[in-house]
Amino acid sequence: MRSLFVLALALASAAFAQRPVTNIEGSVARVTIDRAGGSIVRFEFKDQALNPLRWNSDGAGTSPRSMAHFLCLDRWGQPSEAELKNGMPFHGEATRVMWKEDRAAGGLATLSAALPMAGFAVSRTARVHEREALLMVTERVTNQNKLGRPYNMVQHPTIGPPFLDASVVVDSNARRGFMQSSPLPNPEEPSVFWPQALKDGQPVNLRHLTNDPMPNVVSFVVEDEIGWVTAANASKGLLIGYLWRTSEYPWLNIWRHVDNNGAPLARGLEFGTTGLHQPFGVLLKKGGIFGRRIVAWLEPGETHTRSYVSFLCKIPSGFTGVEKVSYDGSRIVIKPRGGKDIVLNSGAVLP
């Protein structure tokens, strides 16, 4: 068993080595960013080597593509038919271009990319905490066009096997939501409340994924000042979570996917500026849902800045999920559904 584990680590390292990557680390955790698309493809404890972030979209070799935790920019979802014919990809260009490593040393890296069709420039600062398993990311998007334009920006963390299995539990402080499969022009009818969704009128608990991924995508607003989402695998002793300001990212979008044998293959824990998976023409006509905007606007020369924190925790075998995550400016506290709080001495990690 030990030899198989070592072989798996070697294969994973070889896969990273074949692509242009940026590596940063603290004393506790390490992170790998794939510059062919800008995806965060590894976040793990240095003494555990279990990476929850696993997803690899279609592509080959070193071509830019969406992987693991990727950035959807300048849109979330499909372009219009006319935009598609002109070459605009699904989820925008951010994962289809090469990112430049501007700086990388120790636990800090800065990267940047240009999105030629959107006319945007994006830069990212990523920092790994020295003493805790924390990744702090700040991204800046600048409109380089001569005219203002609509856009969206959605973080797309994707967990997969071997971390993801049928025992993984997802928790969040999401509130009211709707199924993306519901018809336009009012997909928010009927609405649901986290963690419930509906399939054929019957309730589905989105905390779990076994062999049925439907409803495939469900979107929720987060009403608290700080949004959070966690995924925990007690049998593997690991939890991954995200923390962000809802003034920057008001929506949480949950995507679920299984393989050909019905086993869990991917769970997207996506937080961003929109909760409607449609082209801009539809978004602008709709305007908003549940009193929240579903499209952002960027004036020429204007820059928008958004940040988030990702964290890892080691958890006991009896861990049943998360009741609450709080942040007071110096600590992140994870309150389990029973048991002792997990405290991360983060310092100030959200602007």
Image (cartoon, grey):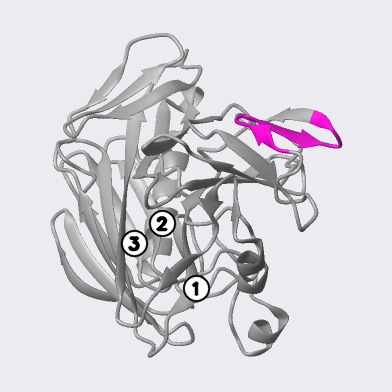
Task: Write the residue at 58% across / 64% down.
Answer: 57
Q: Is residue 84 found left or right of 92 in the rendered image?
A: right
Q: In the rendering, at what x and y percent does residue 201 appear?
A: 85, 33
Question: From which residue to which does the magenta span run?
Answer: 191-202
First reached walking from the N terminus: tag 3 or tag 2: 3
First reached walking from the N terminus: tag 1 or tag 2: 2
Q: Amino acid at mark 3?
A: Ile
First reached walking from the N terminus: tag 1 or tag 3: 3
Q: Answer yes or no: do the residues labelled 3 and 2 have beta carbons within 8 Å?
A: yes
State the SS at label 3: strand
Q: Give the spatial CA distance, label 1 vs label 2.
A: 29 Å
From the viewer's perspective, is residue 277 above or below residue 103?
Answer: above
**Res 288 seen here:** yes
Q: Give the spatial CA distance, label 1 vs label 3.
A: 28 Å
- Residue placed most toward the observer, 105 or 142: 142
Q: Write down the residue under mark 1.
A: 150
Quarter where residue 21 is shown: bottom left
Task: Write the residue at 27% across / 35% down.
Answer: 47
